[in-house]
Amino acid sequence: MSLSIAFTAVFLKAKHGYVGFIDERPLVNAHGTTIEEARQTLVKVAAVAFDEERRVSRGLTAGREVLREAFVIPAAAA
């Protein structure tokens, strides 16, 4: 089963291209000379960040009986 979650990407024009970050996770950010490059890099950086957070979380629960389930948060109006 493939899960997906939606976030809001924010892009700012910078001196040498674009800086992008995830509105809900501003420390996950990237840059590129074009907005498309910044967008593609942001997707890659976000994937790495979430994979690392997941790895750390799994380490905290290693050897323990746990229940993992989907957790859905309703989106706030923009």
Image (cartoon, rainbow, N blue to C red):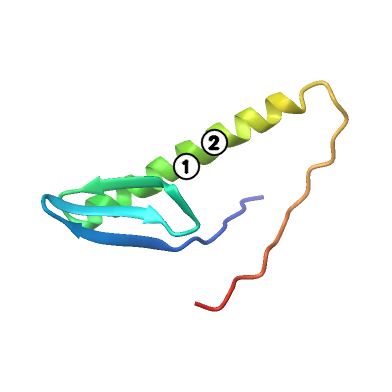
Given residues 16 and 70, the one toward you in this image is 16
Q: Which residue is mark 2?
A: 51
Q: Is residue 70 above or below residue 75?
A: above
Q: Which residue is mark 1?
A: 47
- Residue at the extreme top of the image, as rendered: 63
Which type of secondary structure does the marked residue at label 1 adopt?
A: helix
| Label 2 neighbour load within 10 Å: few <14, some 14-19, many 20+ | few
Which type of secondary structure does the marked residue at label 2 adopt?
A: helix
Q: Residue at x 77, y 28 (%)?
A: 61
- Residue at the extreme bottom of the image, as rendered: 77
Residue 49: give x, y in percent of width and height: 48, 38
State the CA–CA distance, disc 1 to disc 2: 6 Å
**Label 2 is placed on what type of residue?**
Asp
| Label 1 neighbour load within 10 Å: few <14, some 14-19, many 20+ | few
Which disc number belongs to residue 56?
none
Q: Residue at x 85, y 35 (%)?
A: 66
Residue 58: give x, y in percent of width and height: 70, 29
Q: Is residue 52 above or below residue 18?
A: above
Q: Left or right of 60: which side holds 29? A: left
Residue 31: give x, y in percent of width and height: 25, 47
Q: Left or right of 71: which side holds 39? A: left
Q: Residue at x 67, y 32 (%)?
A: 57
Whether pointer 1 and pointer 2 mark residues with C-beta atoms closer than 8 Å, the reply is yes
Residue 64: give x, y in percent of width and height: 85, 26
Q: Is residue 50 above or below residue 64?
A: below
Q: Residue at x 39, y 60 (%)?
A: 9
Q: Left or right of 43: which side holds 6? A: right
